[in-house]
Structures are given as structure tokens and as C-alpha cells.
Image (spheres, coloured by chain):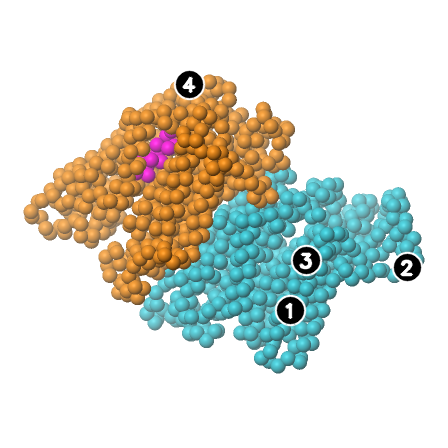
Amino acid sequence: MTPLVQSAAEAAPHAATYATHAVQAAATPVQDIEMRPMAPPLIAALTGLVVLVADLFLPRRRKGVLAVVSAVGLVAAIVPLAGLSVDQDETFCLHASPLHTQQCSYEADGFSVTVQFLVFAAALVTVLLSASTVRQQRLPAGEYWFLLLSATAGAALVPASRDLVSLVIALEVASLPAFALVGLRRGSRQSAEAALKFFLTSVTATAVTLLGVSFLYAATGTLDLYGISTHLHHVDPRLHSLTTAALVLTFAGFAVKAAVVPFHFWVPDSYVGAPIPVAAFLSVVSKTAGLSGLVLLLVHAFANEAAVWGPIVGVLAVATMSVGNAAAVRQRADRPHSAVRLLAWSSVGQAGYLLVPLAAAAPYVAGEREEALTTIGATVSYLLMYAVVNLGAFAVVAHVGRITRENRLADYRGLYRAHPLAAAALAFFLLCLAGLPPGFIGLFAKIAILHTAVANGMTWLAVFMALNVVVALYYYLRWAALLFQPAPRPGPAGEGTHGGGASAKPVGGVLTGGGLPAPALDGGVRVSRSLRACIALTATAAVLLSIFPDPVLTYAAVGFL
Amino acid sequence: MIPVSNTALEALLVAVVVLPLLGAVAALLPAPPGLRGRGPAQAVLRHGVLVTGLVFAAAVVLALGFDRGHAERMQAQTAVPWASVGVEFHLGVDGVSLPLLVLTALLTFLCAVYSYCTMPKEAKKPKGAAEAAGVTGQDDGAAEDARRGSRGPSPRAFTGLLLLLESGMLAAFASLDLLLFFVAFEMVLVPMYFFIAFWGRPEGPERRAAAWKFVLYTQLGSMLMLVGFLAIGTGCGYDMLELAGRHSRFAACQTPIGHGVQLVFVLAAGIGLAVKTPMWPLHSWLPDAHTAAPTVGSVLLAGVLLKMGTYGFVRVLLPIAPGAMHTFAPYLAAFAVVGIVYGSLACLALARKGAGGDLKRLIAYSSVGHMGFVLLGISTMTRTGVNGALFANVAHGLVTGLLFFLVGAVKERTGTTDLDALAGRTGGALYARAPRLGGLLAFGAVASLGLPGLAGFWGEMLALLGAYHPADGLGRTGYLVFMAIGALGTLLTAAYLLVVVRRVCMGDPSAEDRAAALDGADGAGEAAGSAASGATRTDVLVPSGARTPPAVRTLPDVRGHEYAATTPLVALTVLAGLWPALLLGLTSPAVQHLLPGVNR
């Protein structure tokens, strides 16, 4: 293997610095495992197991405890992150490698700790969001919480993985439970179909990724991300097409999870078929996992191929936001599940914005790492904002979903009269997503992203994004305006047959006419306590962040310290 | 000037911007005990009056404390970092922004008072009664309003949005940070959208379409503007003063801005500002928005929101990128004069008999023309022209605000703003039927056409004077042509406004009923017909059967709250017309500072 030998020669002077490590490694050929950096995902995974076992011993009416245990477990997983954010730490290191002095499979640096915090916090909000749904839709509690926590643990592993095997496995750990979660609604054909669609897309993507990984291994002889980066630099010119194919194939796998066009087709159907909290989870946590995987792959492994992937990512970003927004604009208000469908398409559109800094960072990833990470920071800032407001929006949608099973956009007409606070919160979330004051935080996050594009000379990308923001404004504001419109007055009974009024069996024991949401919204269904907590939490966070946006924007401004 | 300490001035300016925002939040909360008033609706409207009144008072004290001797200096500056993407909460006023700040606070206060007196306070009744009135669906306007109030948007939402809007407008004029200016620019979108879509008339899809047109058009412009801002501020920060002083004074970013970047900046930001202004041919959102908006929305839209565009030209583009402005100035001037002529011709067409012209739409088109003068003044890049532009800006705010209040009053009485329906065969005869209202309307029209001695005159004259001798390097011949066309525009403006006065205010008061007369009018479309039937419904006009006796059918004359809304505007229009130095003394030193090296 000529490339290996070449690189070894290149790396030789570098190796001297780590001579002491090498000596130690020679003494202990076994990988050292440190618990400290591993603690957060481990705690989440262990809590999942505890919940699964405890489920067996709990009587039916006490199952609510499991939600509390899950929430406590996630809080416990967040706590050690505070310590990790101070200093960098790594584990599963292989010191004895002759090529790269120290290969670690798991690294807790600024980026991974931030993304892990995002994942755990979002999962915590999802727990709040799920509690009433699990109870009401009689989902199997033990399995539900176990799957949720496992997927969370997997998503938390992704940003810290530093070799391709860990990365792929982490992504699978994040995805496999998600398939089950989507299909968890017993006896629902829609749910099963959504799960199957999601599963097939995702498994195909994984297979493609693995093919790409094997190509990479063939070309470079290593799976370590930094190792791949150095080796690709010196790869045999005859293998160039192989490495390019590997780049495209591995990229595709992660792009599916992040819902990047043209790998987005699973999104709307899966979101609609899944229980609403699971859709919320997919839109935030799974997307975060996929995106952070993409970041690692492009910024670390393919740092030297930036000239190739930079423009591609830019074009994909434009395609993603345009397709997502165009589809969201076309959502008809009276179509069943149009609310969730709209959020699904909007999440595709938002994924497009999230890719912009990645494309903008391309010129820097090879040389100026600091600059590149600060640029990527805009993505993380945007993700944090998006997580808060999107989860909040899903919380309100989940509440309306309890009242009207159809959950059409038209059902939100007059929500302000029935539930003023929930409606005001939803309007605020939508304005944040649209990036329009008074949703300041959304506007600032958009400015951060546009800034990266303009500052790095990709003005065309900024212009496309600006146009998309205008398009997106249309459907967000239309929904927000619906909330305050007077509810249609109860008309003649004949009107009620529209949209399957007969089939719209009251979920919460309240009679609803399919076409007549007004009496349903007025019908005294109170926002359940956990949902109320969820809406209050996200709304408070969004308002506070609008006034003091720096906790979120600091990543865009100074990167990861 | 009264001596006010610097700290107090700073606090006042911050209060002017932040107080409405806090008020908007407070409006959404239930009223505290002791301030409940006769019901939640009344309480919250009163809250709106109180907050806007406080803000206006603060703005007046700020203006009194402002050091007029150093109007070119940024005073009452506050700078607090806000968001680390480069947004700094940097406020300050100079002679350019102070008049607009006071104008905004005044107009918003008047709007709050106006809505306090006109908004249906259905909540005074017990809730059940309001509901019952809504369900039985009585046909008269009050019950309809009550139903709307109780079922749809409430006075609470109205007040909250009004205060949010005020905060955004004031922040735009007080902001010294490019991105903060952009944020403020965006902040007015949501409230104005809701005003048009929810409180506008007539109900129906046109209203919503008008609201969409407004919000999407403006947002498109703003996003382009943001890209322009980012292009110029990248790496150097967004402080306007620093950007403007890059070449001479303390420079955050040592390299001067390249001409290419300047061109991109002026083009992108200029388009955004031109949409807001609105400059022909980017104006097409304006007539629809004005026609559909409620009175308060129209007043603020024309009186303040349009000014944000022209203010942006003076505050942002001129000092930061003078070179690129110089390149684009002739084009701007050309578009401006086309706008002047186009606006006037559109108004003439609307004012014709049988054209089915809407009075609000007519005033909207006249705004396109007036804003054309403002842009022409700016494009000369001379002190005279820019001073004229700033003067015309304020004058237009006063006069158009007044006109929209009056048209709102006419609509309240006759149920229509359709010129044909108003005028009938011989004329609306407002002089006879409601003499004071007619007089005020004629006053507004005359002020708008630029009669010497009233506010409208000085701005347009100075703008034309500036075009007579534009800045060095701008082709003088072209500007002379622009000036000639602009002068022609003033004649056309006078023509249509006088036609409006003749058709609405004059006429035979004892002529047969206007609705009947309408049948004779050529080409009066369906809209006019339906509006006329609306007019008969209001019981103000006697049904067509009652021909005898041919007595004067009077309309209720100006009421108390209408006096309250219009008197300050009338007084200021006269004051600014007779004592232009009051304004020019403020703007002139500031403009001199903005245009270094220009001595005309």
C-alpha cells in the first residue's frame, strides 16, 4: 500500500512530538477507556435500559413514573456536559498507530458537547411532549421511553465520533429506534406505512454509506476521520475517482437523516404517520444527528476535498430550501394532517438554511480550522434556535391533535379564542421560524447564516436564501394569521360531513364535527399539564433568547471554545 | 432648547424606543386592578393612549432638550451590544432623525386617541349580550363591529400591535446600527399586515390579498437590503457612524470600502428602501394596501412607514457609500420624476367622473408622486436637495396623515370612499352638508398640492431647486430636464387635487340623492354601485324616493375626537409652512455633515 508508506513518511516528524504517548502505548496495547467524556450518552442509554426493565414490574396505572424517570435520566445526562465543556477530552484512543500519532474514536470537544447538549435538551422537551400522547394513544410506555432514550443516546454519540465505524454505528443507533417509534401506533396502517417507508429509505442510505466507507478504506487504509483527511491528500491519483465516489456515497447516507434534497422523500409521510411527539423528535434530534455527521464528515474527513464538495453543498442547500418551501407553500389548509405536513416541509426548508454555513466554510476547512469552525457555528446557532421553536410549535400542534384528529390547518382558525396562550405561543414560534420580529432570535439566527454566505463571497447563495425566506414567510404568517381569525360559526349540520366528520372520532372524549373545529376548540379540552409545561418552557426560552440572544449566537460569533 | 442633562436625554431616547415594546407586552396582560375602566376593551385602548402619550411626551422633551446649536452631532447616544452577530443597540438622534421621531410619536398618539374614540367597546356590555348581538346578526354597522370585536381581533390585539408598530418605527429612526435599522424595518411588517388583513375594509379576499402584497413585497425588499448590509459590514461591523467615517475618522476597519462593494451595497439596499418608499416602478403594493387598510393603518403607513425608506437613503446610503450613490443618482432621479408624473396622472385618472376612483387609492397614488419629489431631492446630492427631501418627508407625513384621517371621517359618515358615489352628479357638497369637514378636507388638499405658506410647498420647491444645480459630476442637463418634468408634476398635482375638492366639497347640496344621481354617471362600475347601496343603508342619506322637500341633507360635522386628531396636524402644517426654519434649522447642519465637500 503505497499511500500508507508515503503518509508514514510525512507524518514522521509529527510523531516525534507524541513520542511519550507512543512509548506508553507500546506498554499498554489495549485502548484506554475513560468514563468521563462517555458519561452523557451512557447515562441516557442506561436510563433507557432501566426504564425498559422497570416497565415489567410496574402496574398499568403507574406507568407515568417512567416518563419522570426518563426526564430525570436526561437531566442527569446533561449535567456532566458542563464539566466537559471546560476542557477537551477524548477516549477509545489507539496510541500505537504508526500513521497518526493518536487516533481516538471518541472526542468531547466544543462542537460535540454543544450538539450533545442540544440533543439531550431536545429529548427532554420531547419527553414532556410525549407524556400525554403516550397515555392517551395507549402507546406501550416502556418500549416508547426505551426507544426514545436509545435514539437520543445514539444521536448524542454522532457528534463525538471520530472514526467512520463509530459514526455509522452511532447514526444507526439513532435511527433504528426511530423506525420503531414511528411505527409504534398499534393498529394504524398509516403509522406502519410511514415506518416502513422511513425504514427502507434509511436502510438503503446506510447501505450506501457503508459502501462509501469501504471505498474510503480501500483508498486510504484508515477509518479515522483525521487519518482519512491526511491520506486523501496523498492518495494515488489513479484512485481519485474512487475517493470522489466515496465522498458522494457517504454524503448521501447522512443527507437522508438530515432530510437534504433529493433524499427528503421520507419526511412528510413519516412525520404524518408517526405520533406527533415522534415527528417532533425526528425533526429536531434526528436532523441534528444527521447534520452533525455531515459536518464531521466534510470538515474533518474531507477537509482537503473542499473544492469538490463546497459548491455541491451550496447547490444542495438552495435545492433543499427551495423544494421544502415550495411544497410548504402548496399545503392546502383543509387537507387532513396539513399542520404536521406543513411543519415537515418547513423542516426540509430549514435544513437548506442549515447547510449554507457548511458550504460557506468550504474554503477554510483545509487551512484555517478556527475560521471554519466559527462559520459552522452559525449552523449550530441556528439549530439551537430551530430546536426550541420547532419543538414548541409541535407542542401546540400536539395539543390541537388531541382535539381534532384531522389536525388540518383550518382547524387552527380561532385557536386564539379557545386557547389564547397556546395560540400566542404558536404565533411566536412561527414568527421565529419565519425570522420576523418580534421573533428576534429567528431573525438573528438567519442573519448569522446569511452573514457566513456573504462574508465568504457566496453572495449568490445569500440571495437565494433571502428569496426563500420571503417564500417561507408566506406560509408561516398565513398560519399565524389563521390563529387569530374568527372561528367559523357552527353552520348547518350538513356542513359537518365534510372531511370525514363521521370518522373524526373524538380523541379526548369531546365530540368534534370534522368541518367544524370551532366548537371543538371551545369544547373545554384543556391543555394537558405536560404539554403546558412544554409550551411554557419553549416559549420562555424563545422569548428570553429574543431578548438575550447571545447564549445561542455565541457559536456563530466566536465558534467553539 | 431647555437644559436637559445628557444622561436624561439618553434615557429619554431609550424610553421612546423601548416603552412601546413594554407597553405592547403589557397590553396582552390583564389590566391591573384600579385601571380596569369600564371593561377590558376600554381599559386596553386607554392603555394604548397612555403609552403612546407618554412616548410622545418623551419625544417632545427630547426635542426640547436637543442641542439645536449642534444639530449635526449625534446626541443622546446609547450603545449596548445586543446580539453577537453584530447587532448593537445603538441609538442616537441628530437633526435628520429628530423631526421624524417626533412626527412618528405624534401620529401614533393621534391614532391611539382616534381608535380610543372610534373602536367599538363591545365589552362594556356583559359578554353574553355582545355574543347575542353577534349571533342574531343585526345588520347595522355597530353590531357587525361588535361581532368582529368579540369573535375576531380584539382591541387588545389592536393596541398590542399598534405599540409594536410604534416601537419598530421609532427604532428605525433612532437606530445608528445598520442591523438594528434592519431589525426595526422588519418589525413594522407583522403589525401592519394584521392591521390590513384584520381591520381593513372591505372584508373579503381583496383585503387579504392587499395585506399579502404589502408584506411579501416589503419583505423581499428588506431581505435584499439585508444582503447589501451584510456585504458592506462584513468584517468591519455595522456601526453607521464608523462606516460613514471610515475614510477620515476613527476606523474600525482600516481598508476603505471598494467601489464594487459600494455598488452592490447601494443597489441591494437601495432596492429594499425603494420598495418601502415606494419608488416607481416598485410601488404597486401601495395603492392596494392603502385602499384596504383601516384609517389608522393608512395614516401610519403613509405618514411614517414610507418615510423609513427615504430616511434610509439619507441616513444609510448617502454617508456610507457616497461614491456609489453618485453613480446611481441620475437613475434614481429619473425614476423619481417618472414617479411624480405617473402618480399625478394616475390620480387624475382616478379623479375623473365615472372612473370609479377610490379616494384612499387616490391619496395613495399621490404619495407615489410626493415621494418622487423626496427621491429627486436626495438624488441631487446637494444640501438644498437633501434638505428639501427631508422637509418634504415631514410635510407629507403631516398632510397625508391629515388627509387619511379626514377620508376616514368621510367614510364613517357616508359609508363610502368612492368618488363617484360621493360626488353624485353635481358634487358632494361637503361644504354645505358638513362645512367644517369640507373645509378641513379642502385645507388638506391645498396643503398637499404645495400651496406656498403651507408645509407642502417648501420641500418640493427645495427639491426642484436642488435639481436645478445638482452636485458636481452629475449631468446638469439631465437634471434640468428632470426639474422641468417635476415642475410639470406640481401642476398635475394641483389639477387632480382641485378636481377632488370640486367634486367632493362643492356642488348643489339640495341636489337629488347621490345614490340616484349615480345611475346617470357614465361607467360607474359595480363597486360604485355596491358602495352606494352601502351608503343608503347607513341612514345618513335619504332613500331615493324622498324627493321632497329639496332641503340640504346635512352630515354630522367634525366631532370631538376628529378635532383632536386633526387640529395638531393642521397647526403643524401651517407652522411648518410659515416658519420653515424651524425644520430646516435642524436638518441643515446635519445634512452639511452628511455631505462633506458639497457647498450647495
- Circle on res. B469: 4
Chain in orange on the image? B
Give the residue pinned by disc 3: A116
**Horizontal side, residue A560 vs residue B25: left or right:** right
**Are the residues flagged by discs 3 and 4 in contact, CB closer than 8 Å?**
no
> Magenta segment range?
B390-403
**Are the residues flagged by discs 2 and 4 in contact, CB closer than 8 Å?**
no
Query: Between A183 and B305, which is closer to the camera in this rendering?
Result: B305
**Horizontal side, residue B242 vs residue A376: left or right:** left
Q: Is residue B570 above or below residue A125?
A: above
Which shade is chain A? cyan
Q: Residue at x 32, y 46 (%)?
A: B113
Query: Does mark 4 fall on the same chain as mark 3?
Result: no
Q: Amino acid at mark 2?
A: Thr
Magenta segment includes B401: yes
Q: Position of residue A369 (x, y in %)?
A: 73, 44
Query: Does mark 3 fall on the same chain as mark 1?
Result: yes
Q: CA distance from mark 2 to mark 1?
A: 38 Å
The chain carrying label 3 is A
Q: Amino acid at mark 4?
A: His
